[in-house]
Image (cartoon, grey):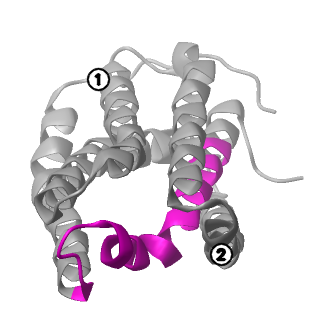
Amino acid sequence: MFPFNRVIKTLILTDLVIFTGWGFIAPIFAVFIVRSISAGDLHVAGIAVGIGLIVRSAAQVPIGRFLDINNGEKDDFWFMVVGMGIVSFVPLGYLLAAEAWHIYVLQALYGLGMAMYSPPWGGIFMRHMNKGKEAEVWGIESSALGMGAGVAGMAGGFLAEAFGFKALFIVASTMNFVGVAGYFYIRESIAPKEGQTVAFPKH
């Protein structure tokens, strides 16, 4: 039996849904910019990806430090929810984007949202994983994300050709919001203060 408790199971499943949604976008993002954005080219696509990564990388450490200073997991939970909520709106923003700077702003928001999401997600995940099963649990998490994003990536190009970019962006955004909603399933299992624990079913 997989070493899952309710928190770990929920975090893995919501991550799978969220990053499968982004997997649909990954293979067509540069093509979307070239075809749909004014003066869009591969240079614009590269800058856009870079902005998202730089903003995320710059913001993650101070956010993580802030969350560590404040005891308990409630702030971790809400940062995770709000961060992924911001990320969830980004694909909808692509629907309205017409200029390169629109994409740059959206990518900066994506980076900020991911910076708010990743540190608390990792902190909650590590604190709730089954002791002695850490490597296995991380392996299952990584494999689930890889499989979901891989399958979505292979399908993304075909779906974009069949239904257009807008359909994929709506699907990705919807899957992100479903993931955010899933976090509330474990809200009562989040410890309010350092050292406290909350009982929850193991499976």
Mark 1 crowdedness (10 Å alpha carbons): few <14, some 14-19, many ≥20? some
Q: Secondary structure at mark 1?
A: helix
**Residue 155 percent coordinates (x, y):** 70, 72
Q: Is 95 part of what is drawn in magenta? A: no
Q: Residue furthest right?
A: 1
Viewer-side residue, 183 vs 50: 50
The residue at the point 90 percent across, 52 percent down is: 1
* Sequence-first tag of 2 and 1: 1
Nearer to us in this view, 42 or 26 = 42
From mark 2 to mark 1, how far is it between C-alphas? 32 Å
Amino acid at circle 1: Asp
| 118 horizontally vs 162: left or right | left
Q: Which residue is mark 1?
A: 75
Vertical side of 151 occupied by 134: above or below: above
Image position of 84 with respect to 193: above or below: below
Task: Identify the residue shown where x is 65% and y is 46%.
Answer: 130
- For label 2, the residue is 150
Asked if residue 35 lies in the magenta stretch, the reply is: yes
Q: In which quarter of the view is residue 134 placed?
A: bottom right
Q: Which mark is residue 101?
A: none
